[in-house]
Structures are given as structure tokens and as C-alpha cells.
Amino acid sequence: MSHRHTIFFLILLSMFIVLDIYIWLGYRKTVKKKYFKYFKWLIPLSTLFFIVGGLLNYFRNQAGLLNASKPLNILFGISLSFIVIKLMLAAFLFVEDLYRSTVLMKNKLIYPKNKVSLASRRKFVRNISLGAATIPLLGAIYATTKGKYAFHEKNIDLTSPRFPASFNGFKVVMFSDFHAGSFDDFEQVKRGLEIINEAQPDVILFAGDIVNNRSVEVLPYLSLFKNLTSKYGKFAVLGNHDYGDYMEFDSDEEKIENTKILEQFFEDAGFQLLNNENSQITNGTDTLNIIGVENWGTGPFPQHGNIKAASEGINKEDFNILISHDPDHWEYEVRHLPEFYDLTLSGHTHGFQTGVSIPGWKWSLAKYRYKRWLGLYQEDGRYLFVSKGFGFLGFPGRIGMTPEIVIINLYHDSV
């Protein structure tokens, strides 16, 4: 473990210890003794499981192991939910402490000669907080066992006056954020990818993050990617995780080899990897441009994408489909360019893997980081679609943000 990671781990551990002590002090007098003897052990044990699970996942990733462990994923996911639970409990306690302290100060001001003390904690606050705490636990159990493999189709019809009528009904099937190193069930992954072939796509587009860290993670799934078929081909771009920047390599040469393995995987699987490049699809009458850029992000994410280089040589009158992993690229560069990129396809956000996505309303913590974080956006005749992705990362589950295969049907609009 690097010095930077060690410091981060120690800071995190210290915060958890303080959190555990605060909760222990807050509930020791409000939970009945016969129950508290179990409750008091559950507090530190949940932290221990989270730390152990996190460390095992870290060292597994550093070792480049190909597949995740189902028991470890479930353990880590549920223990992570206990951290959320403890933050909730601490929030209830903190609000109550503010109220009790305010009452104490008020009584001291009103009755300065009387002896006043801090009011005892109220049992109804305990009952409400403990009841609310069961929600993230039940959610984590579902998310880590069922939700992460609850694949579904997302069907969209789009029209544009720039789209050639000779291609009417052209079917783009797009998926993103595979994150091979997180999966713990090959058959479930196979079932999810089969949705792509069942859609009978005209073209298949992958929008980046095929691995977590090491390229070898995806090798067990080569046969599944090879089996994906479409009329006009398969194209892919790189996401921020595909560069191997989130792990330590023994040498620069090893990191370069990691990239070569990934490039060879796409070639063997029949995908054309578009590293700031473009390719054309023609039906003999009209042409569609498939443009792919390397990752272009904001904040801590790399900016390898070069839209100018990627668009070199294209006919500006043709309909342009851009694949760019991070939706911030569209937000901060693509939509401001004079060149017309008709449809941009992105992923990256995962919808934070936890949230709400129902007709007419969507919410997750992702909205506080990304302006365009999920679904379809339109501005001045240009479309952006942000997928919540196929796989998962970090939290080994999904709830409310189930994995998806996106099917976009394109039509000419003469109006």
C-alpha cells in the first residue's frame, strides 16, 4: 500500500472510531440492556467488516485478480450499508444534542440560580432512528444480490432533420461502464450482454470503462464480446478507468503493456477502438460518422480526448454520432463547438448506482456532481444521452439505478 493510501486509511479509520464512540455513548442509555449487549458489539464489528472488506478488495485489485468474490462483495456491500446506517444514527443524535443543548442554555438564562442539567435522550428519537436505519440495510441486501444484475432495455426514438431518410429506423445499441473486475457471476453477465444481440442492432457502441484497473480483468469475457453482432460493426472508446491510473504498476513498461492488452482485447473481440478517430457507415446512398474520443473529464479525471483530431476528414454535412465517456465533455466543450455533433453517447456517472429513476422524475447524488448525469438531454438540435451503465464499481450493488442496455432508434424528421 502506498504512503498516500496508508494516510487515507488511517484518517478514515480514525473517523470511524470517533463515529462509533459517539453512537455508543448516544444509545447506551436508551436501548434496553438485554438488547444493548448485542447492539454495542454490532457497532465496532460493522466497521471492522467494512475495513477488512475494503482492504481485501484493494489488494485484490492491486494483484490483478480477474474476478470478484460474491461473498466478499455481499459482505462489503452490507458492511458499507452499516456505515450509512451509523451516519444516519449519528445525524439523529446530533440533531437531538443540538436541541438538548439549546434547552439547557435557555433554562440557564431563564433560571440562573437554579441547578439545571442536560435533558435525557428521548426514547421516541431512538425508535424513529433505529427504524429508519433498517432501510439502507434492506436496500443493500437487495442491491448486492439482485439489483446489480437486474439488466433492462432502455428504448428511445430520436428524430433529426439531419438524419438521412435512407437510414430510417437505424438501431444504435449502446452500453457503458462494464467494469469487468467487479463482477462475481459470469452467467449473469452473459445474460445481460445477450440483450444486445436480441435487439438486432445496426451498430454496437461501447462508451468506456471496460475494466476497473488492470486490462486482464476483461479477458474472461472475450468470448461474450466476440459473440456480439451487428450489421455495421462494433465501436468502442476508453474511459478514465481504462488507462490504469488508479493502481500502482512496477514500471512504466508494465503500464504500457497493460494498455496493449486492452487494445488487443478490443481487436480480438471485433471492436474498432476509436482513440480520437472516426469511422464511416454507408448504405450506398448516405453516410453516418461514428466519432470516438479518448476520455475527457473535469476535476480529477484525465483529458486525453481531442475532438479536433477525432473529427478530421469527416463531411460536416453527414450525421455525426460521438462517443465520449464523460458527459462533462459535452457540457464544457462539445455543445459549444461550431461543428455539429448530432448525438453524443456517454456513461461514467453510473447514476451513483443508488437513486430513483422513474418516468417524470429522477434523483441521485450524481446530480450534485454532474449537470447532465442521466438520460436524454437536448439543446439546439443536439442530443446527449448519459447511460447509468452496465456494471458497478465501489459499492458492489445497484438499487433504483439498475444496469441498462440502451437502444436508440434514429429517424429522419422532415419538419
Image (spheres, grey):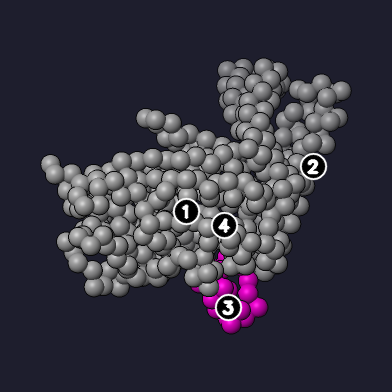
Say few, some or many: other residues with alpha carbon within 10 Å of mark 1 (under 14 / 14 to 19 / 20 or more). many
Q: Are marks 3 and 1 in contact (CB under 8 Å)?
A: no
Q: Between disc 2 and disc 4, whose residue precedes?
A: 2
Q: Give the x, y percent position of residue 23.
A: 72, 35
Name the residue nearer the viewer: 94 or 274: 274
Which residue occupies 78% across, 23% down? 31
User: Could you classify mark 3 by the number of other residues whose Cα lies within 10 Å: few (under 14), some (14-19), or many (20 or more)?
Assistant: few
- The residue type indicated by label 2 comes to Leu
Give the mark nearer the N terminus: 1 vs 2: 2
Q: Secondary structure at mark 3?
A: helix
Task: Give the overall secondary structure of the magenta segment.
Answer: helix
- Of marks 4 and 3, the one in the foreground: 4
Marks 4 and 1, the one that precedes in the sequence: 1
Left or right: 367 as drawn, with respect to 85: left
**Labels 4 & 3 near each other (Cβ < 8 A):** no
Q: The disc labelled 1 sits on which kind of residue?
A: Ser
Q: Between marks 4 and 3, how big is the CA–CA gap?
A: 23 Å
**Amino acid type shown at disc 3:** Glu
Which quadrant is home to the C terminus?
top left
Nearest the eye: 137 or 85: 137
Q: CA–CA distance between discs 3 and 2?
A: 41 Å
Dot 4 amino acid type: Leu
Q: Which mark is residue 224?
A: 4
Looking at marks 3 and 2 on the same chain, the residue that comes earlier in the sequence is marked by 2
Vertical relation: 76 (above or below) 93: below
**Disc 1: which residue:** 176
Q: CA distance from mark 1 to mark 2?
A: 36 Å
Give, as a single range, the part of the protein colored magenta. 243-263
Q: Is label 2 or label 4 in front?
A: 4
Nearer to me, 47 or 123: 47
Q: CA distance from mark 4 to mark 1?
A: 15 Å
